[in-house]
């Protein structure tokens, strides 16, 4: 598996809200691309769902472009 372009670990929130509004799809796309990531429990950022982290930086309203710095 490859890491993201910036070589930092990607974490995808899988709390119910994030998972239901795009977190699950983001995880599936990263898997399809062979990009390593981890699933995290709710990060209490539900208003900004889906959320993720790249390294220690929160990514609000996460998208593939934001996660991969495209």
Image (cartoon, helix red, strand yellow):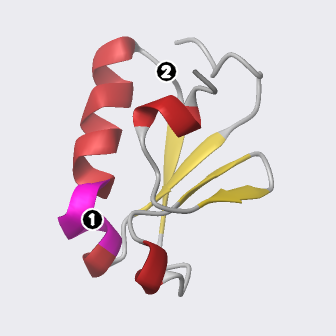
Q: Is residue 23 shown above or below 34? A: below
> Can you give x and y, in whole percent of width and height, for residue 66 in the image?
55, 38
> Can you give x and y, in whole percent of width and height, for residue 23 in the image?
32, 55
| Residue with the mark numbered 2 | 35
What residue is rendered at 63% in x and 22% in y?
4
Q: Which numbered dot is residue 11?
A: none
- The stretch drawn in magenta includes residue 40: no
Location of residue 30 by image quarter: top left
Query: Is 53 situated left or right of 47 in this image?
Result: right
Location of residue 2 by image quarter: top right
What residue is rendered at 76% in x and 22% in y?
6
Q: Is residue 21 shown above or below 23? A: below
| Secondary element type, mark 2 | loop
| Secondary element type, mark 1 | helix
- The earlier-in-sequence mark between 2 and 1 is 1
Query: Is 10 situated left or right of 14 in this image?
Result: right
> Can you give x and y, in whole percent of width and height, for residue 54 in the image?
69, 44
Q: Which residues are magenta?
A: 18-22
Which one is nearer the viewer's eye here, 57 or 48? 48
Disc 2 residue crowd, few under 14, some 14–19, many 20+, Cα 10 Å: some
Magenta stretch, main secondary structure class:
helix
Counting every numbered tag in the picture gives: 2
Query: Is 51 situated left or right of 70 in this image?
Result: left
Query: Is 55 situated left or right of 48 in this image?
Result: right
Q: Which numbered dot is residue 19?
A: 1
Q: Is residue 70 shown above or below 46? A: above
> Can you give x and y, in whole percent of width and height, for residue 38 in the image?
52, 46
């Amino acid at each position: 598996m490859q890491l993201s372009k910036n070589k930092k670990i990607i974490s995808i929130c899988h709390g119910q809200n994030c998972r239901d509004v795009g977190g699950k799809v983001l995880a599936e796309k990263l898997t399809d691309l062979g990009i390593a990531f981890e699933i995290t429990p709710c990060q209490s950022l539900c208003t900004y769902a889906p959320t993720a982290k790249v390294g220690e930086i929160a990514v609000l309203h996460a998208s593939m472009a934001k996660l991969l710095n495209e």
